[in-house]
Every structure is written in C-alpha cells, then in structure tokens.
Image (spheres, helix red, strand yellow):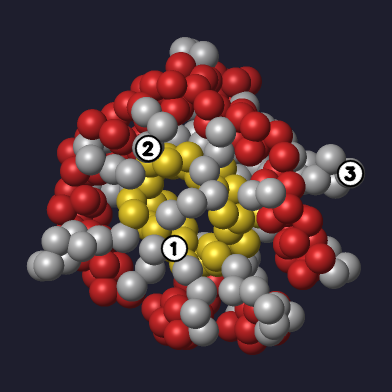
C-alpha cells in the first residue's frame, strides 16, 4: 500500500453512509468504519462497503485481556478488511495474541496497527488524568516500539509524531495519522493536528480525515483537495 487518504465515515446509520459514498462517482475512497457505525449496523455494513469496492480500515481499537482480543481478532479476520487496530496500552502479550488471532489459516491477514495516544490527549491530560509523567512523545515512541516488537505493521499516531516513529521503528513501519485539518478549518476536539501537506512532509503514510471532508459543503471537492495536498 502507498500513501492514501482514509475518509472517516463516522455516521450513525448505513443510509447516511451510503448517501455520502454515493457522491463519489469517479473515486472509491479508502474508508474508515469506526465504533459509531459498526455498533449501529454490525458486520453487514463492512461487507456492504467492501462489496462497493472500497478498502476498509476497521477502527474498533480493541483493548482487553490477550485471550479475548485474540478471539475477537479471529472473528474480524473473516470480514476481509484491509486494516484493523487495537490499543498499544494493552501490552505486548495482547498485541501478540491479536496478530495470532487475526492470521487466517492460509497465513494471510489484514494489516494490524496500534493506537499510541489518542490525538485528543495532550501532555497535560496525560499527566493529570492518566498519571503518566513521561514526555508524551517518549510514551508514543515506546508504544510504537512495543507494537513493532509484537509483530504489528504500524501505529496510529499524531502526524506530528510520524517522522520520529519512522526514525524509531523504520521506514516500513506504517504511520496512520488522524488529527488532520485544512489550514483554514477548525481543530475541533483534536489537540495534536496539522494539515495534509505538512503530514506528507513529516512522513505520514496514511492520513485519516473525517469532518473536513464529511461535513464539507462539497465533500468530493474536499476529498480531492486532501488527496492533492497529501498524495500529490
């Protein structure tokens, strides 16, 4: 997989999702299905969007004891998605179990990436609410190193951290980065943000973009702007 823009389809229903995707007559955007849509519609929405020809990042952020995550990943492996994820905070054993569960009998599996720290978390929140006193970037790099040691393919991180992740874990270790906003847009509830063009410069492999595209007056134009800025 090369650089790409992943559109976060954070809709409440299948009907809203299809109405959005139907706007794209010339492209098949890479789509993120998150908790809101998956919990509302279940695995059927994944199969339906895949049948439309879209690549899918299934963003469920699994985080539980290793055996539970392993069994859950074994179920998700049958959905034919392209990327799955979990929380790196679950530890090495959980991540190793996830790889094992996600791997099909023929040896194939979707890409598996780990969330380091949510882009809604900044240094102050990490220290005051999570009681993690180390510098945020240091924590992210440790989580990324753990994910690589567990056999994962990459991490979800802030675009501001993508270059350092590659320095720590290698160029082939994927960085999937939310927290993307156009320079003339609002940051919303994201704390660590940057533009598509800057994310490309820093080293993001994939950017995940939601409201700047889905809430735009012309979503297709916003998507194309994002692709032009990020992919070139």
Q: Secondary structure at mark 2?
A: loop
Report crowding for label 1: few under 14, some 14 to 19, many 20 or more residues within 10 A (C-alpha): many
Q: Secondary structure at mark 3?
A: loop
The disc at residue 185 is none
Q: Earlier in the sequence, mark 2 or mark 3?
A: 2
Q: Is residue 96 left or right of residue 130?
A: left
Nearest to the observer: residue 100 or residue 67: 100
Q: Earlier in the sequence, mark 1 or mark 3?
A: 1
Between marks 1 and 3 in the image, the one whose residue lies nearer the viewer? 3
The disc at residue 184 is 3
Q: Earlier in the sequence, mark 2 or mark 1?
A: 1
- Residue 100 in percent (x, y) is at 15, 53
Between marks 2 and 3 in the image, the one whose residue lies nearer the viewer? 2
- Residue 97 in percent (x, y) is at 17, 48
Is residue 60 at all visible to an observer of this figure? no
Q: Quadrant of the N terminus?
A: bottom left
Location of residue 200 by image quarter: top right
Please name the residue shown 39% across and 78% down the image: 43
Q: Is residue 19 above or below residue 92?
A: below
The disc at residue 58 is 1
Q: Is residue 206 above or below residue 42?
A: above
Q: Give how far apart the Cα atoms at labels 2 and 1 are.
A: 21 Å
For label 2, the residue is 172
């Amino acid at each position: 997989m090369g650089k790409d823009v992943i559109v976060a389809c954070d809709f409440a229903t299948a009907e809203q999702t299809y109405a959005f995707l139907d706007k794209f007559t010339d492209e098949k955007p890479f789509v993120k299905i998150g908790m809101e849509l998956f919990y509302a519609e279940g695995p059927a929405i994944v199969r339906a969007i895949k049948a439309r020809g879209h690549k899918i990042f299934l963003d469920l952020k699994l985080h539980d004891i290793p055996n539970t995550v392993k069994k859950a990943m074994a179920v998700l492996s049958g959905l034919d998605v392209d990327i799955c994820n979990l929380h790196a905070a679950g530890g090495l054993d959980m991540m190793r179990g996830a790889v094992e569960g996600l791997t099909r009998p023929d040896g194939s599996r979707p890409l598996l990436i780990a969330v380091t720290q949510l882009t809604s978390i900044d240094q102050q929140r990490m220290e005051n609410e999570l009681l993690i006193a180390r510098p945020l970037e240091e924590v992210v790099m440790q989580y990324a190193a753990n994910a690589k040691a567990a056999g994962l393919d990459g991490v979800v991180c802030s675009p501001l951290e993508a270059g350092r992740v590659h320095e720590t874990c290698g160029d082939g270790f994927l960085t999937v980065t939310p927290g993307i906003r156009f320079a003339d847009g609002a940051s919303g509830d994201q704390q660590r943000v940057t533009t598509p063009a800057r994310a490309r410069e820093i080293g993001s492999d994939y950017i995940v973009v939601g409201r700047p595209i889905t809430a735009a007056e012309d979503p297709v134009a916003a998507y194309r702007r994002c692709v032009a800025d990020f992919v070139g």
